[in-house]
Amino acid sequence: MVPSLDQLTRLSEFDAQLHLRVVFGPGSIGRVGQLARELGGHRVLVVTDSGIVKAGHAGKVIGLLEAAGLEAACFDCVRENPDTTVVDECVAAARAANADLLIGLGGGSSMDTAKGCNFILTNGGRMQDYWGVDKATKPMLPLIAIPTTAGTGSECQSFALISDPVTHQKMACGDSKAMARVALLDPELTVSQPPRVTACTGIDAIAHAVETAVTKKRNANSLAFSHAAFGLLAESFPIVLREPANLGARSKMLLGAAFAGTAIEHSMLGAAHSAANPLTAHFDIIHGHAVGLMLPHVVRFNAQDVEAARGYEAIADSAEALAAQLETLLKITDLSRSLSELGVKREAIPLLAEEAAKQWTAGFNPRAIGEVDFRALYAAAF
């Protein structure tokens, strides 16, 4: 009997087939060698960043792979908001290792880099060739996604978000073949996150749950994951900020982030993410922080649409109560709560609004939104 989504949220560990296989629970990283062998892997490339190496997670994974009789190499040059340059570097490493299986270990940047590498390694060309949906024509290598942050939910998505190094435009490259075969969710790996990373990734995950609950593409399946994710995240986020070593709260955060990522796969995102991307590109504001700062203003904007207001009421008493709750969550992180505090110049608002209106997620926002509306949102957040 397959457990229901409601039942899964109450389990401390499970191994379930959703739209991909999800293995969840403390210590589940110990199964990585077995899982790689089940997928037919012999030569594995672990795609990660230097911080994950320093935390010891990469070495542990490599040791487990080698103990299972597999060859393992490591590409540890992933950078935040990966662009095509780092993807090309990863492809070179995968070719040098003759990899037949990839592991994305870390935050969303590591998993996106691994997916981007998979596109080019198996199908050739450049990342720009895969901007859009289902552009790959050949099979891809098996991928195991292992998040060490409770944030992007990339482990449960078929999209790689890769930036163009010239335009800074984030290219969403999606293909069902790029989906990880296994999402391995071990909350013990998230305890080592610095407080600021916990805060920014947690806010990002909460934003995913909120935005997916109202997008134009929402459906019964996505809503089930959005609502389950918001319940887990809103409950556990204040706890992990106060008690970083609380494994129960870390578990709920990790599962909530994965469920929110699953909701994105089915319903996409909205205007808060559109507004955040130019802030990251021009002012180096961490993505999760930028999204969290803009989200309450977007909720109030969208609440003028009756259907969107009802969508918010499904997860809070009202849209205004939800916006206030989101502001409170941002406040307890001690992150800056205005654009002016973050060094954004008021004269930059027209450019930010122009770029935000062109972001692909804006098209899924429940209420039609354009450049003039984004100017007002940025002004409200100033």
Image: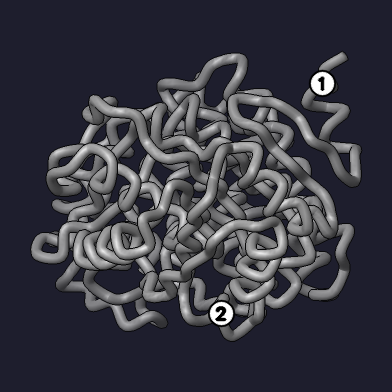
Give the labeled residue for mark 1.
4
Which residue is at 57% across, 76% downward? 52
Task: Identify which residue, 35 or 374, lies in the foreground.
Answer: 35
Give the labeled residue for mark 2.
53
Left or right: where 158 falls relative to 145 = left
Q: Do the CB atoms of the residues marked 1 and 2 lie less than 8 Å apart?
A: no
Q: Amino acid at mark 2?
A: Val
Q: Position of residue 31 (x, y in %)?
A: 76, 51
Q: Quadrant of the C terminus?
A: bottom left
SS type, badge 1: loop
Image quadrant assignment for residue 147: bottom right
Left or right: where 161 falls relative to 41 = left
Q: Give how far apart the Cα atoms at labels 1 and 2 are.
A: 36 Å
In primary-sequence order, the first of circles 1 and 2 is 1
- Residue 147 seen in the figure: yes
Q: Amino acid at mark 1?
A: Ser
Select label 1 or label 2 by which is in front. Answer: 2
